[in-house]
Image (tube, grey):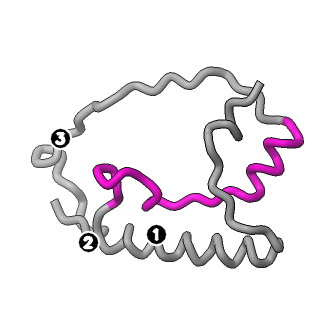
Amino acid sequence: MPTNDASITWDIKKSKIVKVATLKIPIQIFATKERYKLAENLSFSPGHSLIEHRPIGDINEARVKIYEEMSKFRHSGNSEALYEPTNKDFYHA
């Protein structure tokens, strides 16, 4: 199926849905001062992934570039450095 033409509806007979996982996310407490501060400095990129999971197609390539520029603009406007969190930022006692 085409990856560079979003106007074409994918044919479900040619591209069947394949379940690859079930995610179970435990209840979490997010309403803390530290979490809010961390959230303000996070950035999302569809391209920040393993090579096997990287998005494909021109639209996603554009998204990766646009999200990167938006992040730079926001961090610059907030006078904050770009920060890549680690597990310790999310799983501390």
First reached walking from the N terminus: tag 2 or tag 3 = 2
Residue identified by numbered label 2: 4
For the residues labelled 1 and 2, say whether their Cβ atoms are less than 8 Å apart.
no
Q: Amino acid at mark 2?
A: Asn
Numbered label tally: 3
Residue 16 disc label: 3
SS assignment at label 1: helix
Rounded to the nearest angstrom, the CA distance separating label 3 from label 1 is 27 Å
Q: For residue 64, which numbered disc appears in the image?
A: 1
Q: Is residue 46 left or right of residue 58?
A: right
Span colored in magenta: 32-55
**Label 1 sits on what residue type?**
Val
Tell me what residue is drawn at x 63 percent, y 55 percent. Answer: 84
User: How far apart are labels 2 and 3 at the CA level?
Assistant: 19 Å
Q: Earlier in the sequence, mark 3 or mark 1?
A: 3
Q: Is residue 5 above or below residue 33?
A: below
Q: Amino acid at mark 3?
A: Lys
Upstream in sequence: badge 1 or badge 2:
2
Looking at the rendered structure, the secondary structure element under dot 2 is loop
Viewer-nearest of discs 3 and 1: 1
Q: Residue at 68% of width from left, 37% of height from top?
A: 88
Counting other residues with Cα less than 10 Å from the Cα at mark 2, is it few (<14), some (14-19), or many (20 or more)? few
How busy is the neighbourhood of tag 3: few (under 14 within 10 Å), some, or many (20 plus)? few
Q: Position of residue 25 (x, y in %)?
A: 56, 25
Q: Position of residue 37 (x, y in %)?
A: 82, 51
